[in-house]
Amino acid sequence: MTRIYPHFIVAKFGGTSVADFDAMSRSASLVLADKNVRLVVLSASAGVTNLLVELASGLESRLRLDKIETLRSLQYNILSRLKQPEAIGQEIDRLLDNIHRLAEMAAVARSAALCDELVSHGEMISSLLFVEVLREQEVEAQWFDARKVIRTDDTFGCAAPAISAIAAMAENHLRPRIEQTLVVTQGFIGSDAAGRTTTLGRGGSDYTASLLAEALQASRVDIWTDVAGIYTTDPRIVPQAKRIDNLSFAEASEMATFGAKVLHPATLLPAMRKDIPVFVGASSNPSAGGTRVCRDVATPSRYRALAVRRQQTLLTLSSVNAQPAHRFLADTFAMLSRHEMAFDLVTTSETSIALILNATSATSGEADTLTTALLTELSSHCHVEVETGLALVSLIGNALSEGAAVCKEVFAELENHPVRMICHGASRHALCFLLPAQFADSAVKALHRSLLE
Ligand code: ASP
Ligand code: MG
């Protein structure tokens, strides 16, 4: 079949880019500036998901009504600026009534499934409003329910996408539409095999955009946010941080995993699988340019960026009954896997294992990694120690595990920092270390000054 748009682009707009009518209008102009943009993926308006998560936690009636009122006025501020608000007014009211009803249910008995159903309304509303903003600019656009194609498992709050099912469903239901008109859909939300609404974890709209780009073999993903690209570190910690114009998938993916907030950590995986470049820019200031992420960058330097992940927990497990090391490691990891515990950095000695647990990014915001069941089982098998209040600082770069001077250059700067654990060697692109949270900013500042300025 010949395609009318063989080089189409998926454009994703984050919460601040659809925060109010003016932001939506600017985002609409960006969509229209490139005729290859055929699929638009939206977040909820800024602040809306947080309100919905609070409602899903089961608020008492006064507080609940307050939050719903805040939400209503936020969305009505956009609706009332449309030339013909009546075109979608009823539909918006229906969704707001739904929110009300679901929030009442959550106050009786909350659940992760109910939370996902409730929060999905943020993206539903923003996408309806955006279609109208486009229509009022005389652009033909269709609204599309992302749950028809984003098939996931039933891990509510942090669902895993089913890649081949998504490819098949997107080909059937979405491809014909993008050949016809511009399509606007929701990020973040999906559905399981039983048709129940799921979400991809906080910040998941980026991931939706790259999953759909992968499914439909788009030529590029544009992520429009509130910063003009990806920086060497968070400019709120280091004002001298600079935008990086070109990043490789490997570098950007390590940055997202280790705490750079610009992209959802999984966003680059689909893009890498299909070699689709990702652009990150600011919708309020497109002429400022942005960061282009693609397979390779020409002559990448050794040190590229610093990221911080806060709220880390260190779990240290020590063997008590002189088991052989291989048995102790195997039994412990089997136990962790049965409990589906998420950890991503590990160091081991002959008799102990230290693991870094990342506070969950699940939609409900509940830290459920260290369950009592898991702790009980672990305690019957080994000595368990839990340390909290830690932060993980990661240096991202290239060939970090090869350079003779890397350790000297990095740790010389950290003389006065009580480093608790170091992960170096497994990845060529990241050197990570854990330290008490109150030392994280000063470690980042010192390393940025000496390695990146
Ligand atoms: N609205 C969702 C959130 O706030 C998803 C996203 O913005 O990407 O987490
Ligand atoms: Mg985001």
Image (cartoon, rainbow, N blue to C red):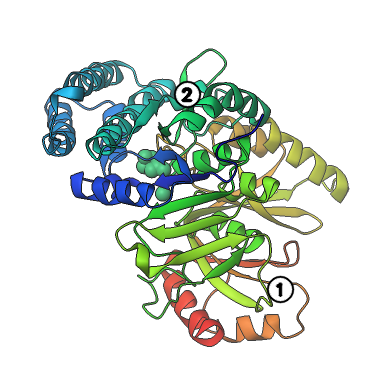
Task: Say if 223 sits above or below 70 in the image.
Answer: below
Crowding near pointer 1: few (<14 within 10 Å), some, many (20+)?
many
Task: Say if 321 sits above or below 397 in the image.
Answer: above
Q: Amino acid at mark 1?
A: Leu
Front residue (pair 43, 316): 43
Reading the image, the residue beneath label 1 is 400
Q: Position of residue 354 (x, y in %)?
A: 67, 55
Q: Position of residue 241 (x, y in %)?
A: 43, 76
Front residue (pair 179, 419): 179
Crowding near pointer 2: few (<14 within 10 Å), some, many (20+)?
many
Q: Residue at x 19, y 44 (%)?
A: 21
Q: Position of residue 345 (x, y in %)?
A: 65, 55
Instruction: Compare marks 2 and 1 and give the one earlier in the sequence.
Output: 2
Mark sitting on residue 250 = none
Q: Residue at x 74, y 54 (%)?
A: 352
- Nearest to the eye among marks 2 and 1: give it: 2
Task: Say if 62 sits above or below 378 in the image.
Answer: above
Horizontally, residue 422 falls left or right of residue 40, namely: right
Mark sitting on residue 147 = 2
Whether residue 238 is visible, yes or no, is yes
Q: Position of residue 123 (x, y in %)?
A: 34, 33
Q: Amino acid at mark 2?
A: Arg
Q: Is mark 1 within 8 Å of ligand 2?
A: no
Front residue (pair 411, 241): 241
Q: Residue at x 42, y 60 (%)?
A: 281
